């Protein structure tokens, strides 16, 4: 009895793991990959800079760029 119960648990775990992997390899998927489009929703003004901006800080309504 000491061996049967842990063995049943381990085999049950592996069976669920293997069956989950098999069900994930379906050829007929019901989804289509979407493009990763970027939407700039909160941009009010674009500021041109000479160098790329690597850091932004905001304090008291003032934005600082590095």
Image (cartoon, rainbow, N blue to C red):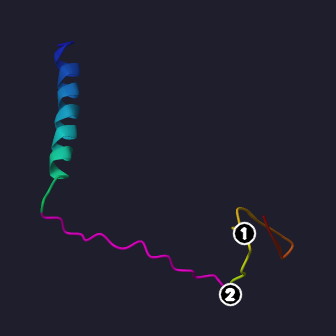
The span picked out in magenta is 28-45
**Label 1 secondary element:** loop
Labels 1 & 2 near each other (Cβ < 8 A): no
Q: Crowdedness of circle 2 by 10 Å Cα count: few (<14), some, many (20+)?
A: few
Closer-to-camera residue (18/62): 62
* Magenta part, dominant SS: loop
Locate residue 60: give its quadrant: bottom right
| C-alpha span from label 1 to label 2 | 21 Å
The residue lying furthest to the right in this view is 60
Q: Quadrant of the N terminus?
A: top left
Secondary-structure class at tag 2: loop
Q: Residue at x 24, y 69 (%)?
A: 31
| Mark 1, residue position | 51
Q: Residue furthest bottom?
A: 44
Which residue does the image show at 78% across and 64% down from the upper left? 66
Q: Is residue 34 left or right of residue 20?
A: right
**Up-down: is 66 above or below 16?**
below
Residue that label 2 marks: 44
Q: Earlier in the sequence, mark 1 or mark 2?
A: 2
45 and 1: which is toward the camera: 45
């Amino acid at each position: 009895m000491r061996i049967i119960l842990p063995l049943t648990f381990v085999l049950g775990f592996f069976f669920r793991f293997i069956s989950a992997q098999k069900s994930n390899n379906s050829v007929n998927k019901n989804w289509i990959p979407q493009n990763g489009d970027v939407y700039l929703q909160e941009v009010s003004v674009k500021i041109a800079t000479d160098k790329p901006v690597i850091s932004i800080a905001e304090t008291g309504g003032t934005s600082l760029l590095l």
